Amino acid sequence: MAHRELLGTAEIYCPDSLSELAGLTPEAAQDVVSGWLSSAMIVVPYLSKPNLPGATDDSCPTTRFVPAGEVVRPPLSKRFRNKGSLVIGIDAISTVDGDGNVHTVPLSQALVVERFGVIQLAHLGHGCVTTISDFADAADKLRSVLPPRRFRQAVRQLSSHW
């Protein structure tokens, strides 16, 4: 009962007798399980795409429209490999790649995490993470536009003695 309530698997129930499952064909089981994909949490390695029939692509949308705001470019030493920019607006943070594709994260859904010298911008609404380390000069500005709980700096782990 709890499994059915938590996971929404009302199509299948655990019968008292396993003999009742004899009539369940592999095709019927596949239909039931594929119905769960719309709400399933799947972990997929970065830059790979799952080939799962019935799964929806919920990637973050990009546009070509660059919003208004303070434009931050990488330092000269990093501009050769990163031709993009970071735009800090009054209600969003946008990354613009070298090809002009714009990925915007509303401030209400933005989380900046600094860990071991790597700065990442997370879009909590989509679950995507963008590395913005080349824009480290903007860290103070990001701290000023985000609530303190939305700018996290990981504590360095001290070496432990076993």
Image (spheres, rainbow, N blue to C red):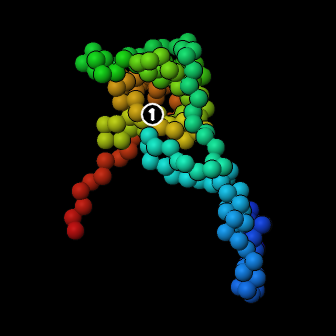
**Residue where numbered disc 1 is placed:** 130
Quarter where residue 33 is shown: bottom right
Residue 138 or residue 147, whichever sits in front: 138
x 71%, y 60%: residue: 31
When the figure is inspected, residue 157 is found, relative to residue 72, above or below; the finding is below
| Figure quadrant of the N terminus | bottom right
Q: Mark 1 packing: few (<14 Cα in 10 Å), some, or many (20+)? A: few
Q: Position of residue 37 (x, y in %)?
A: 65, 54
Residue 143 x, y percent position in the rendering: 46, 29
Left or right, 32 with respect to 117, comes to right
Relative to the observer, which residue lies in front, 91 or 34?
34
The reply, left or right, for residue 75 in relation to residue 12 is left
- In depth, the one of 112 and 15 nearer the eye is 15
| Residue at position x 72%, y 81% in the image | 22
Q: What's the amino acid at mark 1?
A: Thr
109 over 12 or under it: above or below: above
Query: Which residue is pictured at 38% across the width and 38% down the height?
Result: 114
Outermost residue, left direction? 161
Question: Residue shown at 57%/36% (left/top)?
Answer: 59
Q: How far across and down, in percent of the image, does residue 135 sit?
A: 37, 24
Q: Is residue 107 visible?
A: no
Residue 160 location (% of width, % of height): 24, 61
